[in-house]
Amino acid sequence: MTTSSPSPIAVSPARRMAFKVVAALTGVLAGFVVFGLPSLISPWFASGDQVLHRAHDFGWGVLMGLIVSVGALTQLRRPEEKVAGAQQVALAAVALLLVALLTLPPNPLPTVLAVLAALLVYLHPVRARVLRGASQPSPAMATIALAGAVPLLWYAVAQAATQRGAPATDPHAELLHYGAMAAMALALALVAGLGALRTVGWQIPALCAGLGAVWFGVGSAAFPDSESSFGLLGGAVAVLAGIAYLAAARLETRRASPRRPPPT
């Protein structure tokens, strides 16, 4: 079955420009100012004190680099066709803000991200579609997402509890790393579910969730003794789950693509 492209909606140039500014600010803040995108790579080259934080850096890269930054930057071009990218940013902001309210001391980043995500939704050229979220759910993707949500939510609760109970001398707690990992796991579960709903532009959260599971799984398997790592077995399972989710997304894309007539 094919899906038609969203019809264009008249939006004032000022609103469209403001929307693009907010999308760019969100993408740059998450991707570079707080080192979201570099954190996807830097753990492989960690040295000195940074060796302790390898798994945390991988998780931060998944949360702020893959989910928030990529989701925001996709909105800079044809956002009407990529509604799910804005929804993805909003879900990540909700996850981070919720964990921050429950487990973290006062910190400006969750609030700033929540404000930017709210502006991104409010200024979106097709705001009604972002809020309505009409979808065509994929049973296969939903099954994998729900199965993965169970260990992810368990991990998020455990990391949040560790953040609350850790002594002040714990270097990971001092840097709020356990709370960040709880937000990463919660956001990953939410974004995988969003991809399974197949809202407009669903390939964005599907790709980010699948790659996020694979990337954190690889990092966990490579550094099983790193604090907050999934471990060798857990990392391998995350990689396989991410690949299965990506494969299911690929099949959905092929089913939705119009069939070309055979050559004559």
Image (spheres, grey):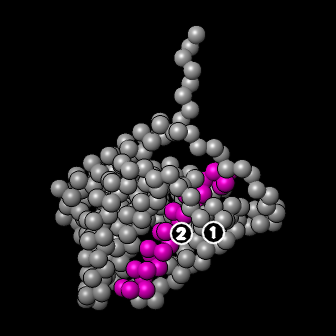
Going from N to C along the chain, the mark reached first, 2 or 1, is: 2
Q: In the rendered picture of this protein, how many numbered marks are placed on residues?
A: 2
Q: Is residue 262 magenta?
A: no
Q: Residue at x 32, y 46 (%)?
A: 244
Q: Marks 2 and 1: CB-CB under 8 Å?
A: yes
Q: Which mark is residue 121?
A: 1
Quadrant housing residue 146:
bottom left
Q: Residue at x 42, y 60 (%)?
A: 193
* Crowd band around label 1 with a 10 angstrom C-alpha radius: few (<14), some (14–19), many (20+): many
* Crowd band around label 2 with a 10 angstrom C-alpha radius: few (<14), some (14–19), many (20+): many
Position of the C terminus, as image quadrant, is: top right
Q: Which mark is residue 207?
A: none
What type of secondary structure mainly makes up the magenta span?
helix
- Amino acid type at image mark 1: Val
Whether residue 42 is situated above or below residue 25 in the rendered picture: above
From the top left corner, tell me how far across and down residue 255 is, in percent: 47, 37
Whether residue 54 is situated above or below residue 178 in the rendered picture: above
Q: Residue at x 17, y 56 (%)?
A: 233
Specify the segment rendered in magenta: 77-103
Tell whether 34 sits left or right of 131: left
From the top left corner, tell me how far across and down residue 88 is, in percent: 51, 62
From the top left corner, tell me how far across and down residue 70 is, in percent: 53, 57
Residue 172 shows up from this direction: no
Whether residue 78 is situated above or below residue 94 in the rendered picture: above
Q: Residue at x 26, y 65 (%)?
A: 151
Query: Does dot 1 land on a helix, a strand or a loop?
Result: helix
Residue extending furthest toward the top: 264
- Amino acid type at image mark 2: Ala
Name the residue beneath numbered marker 2.
90
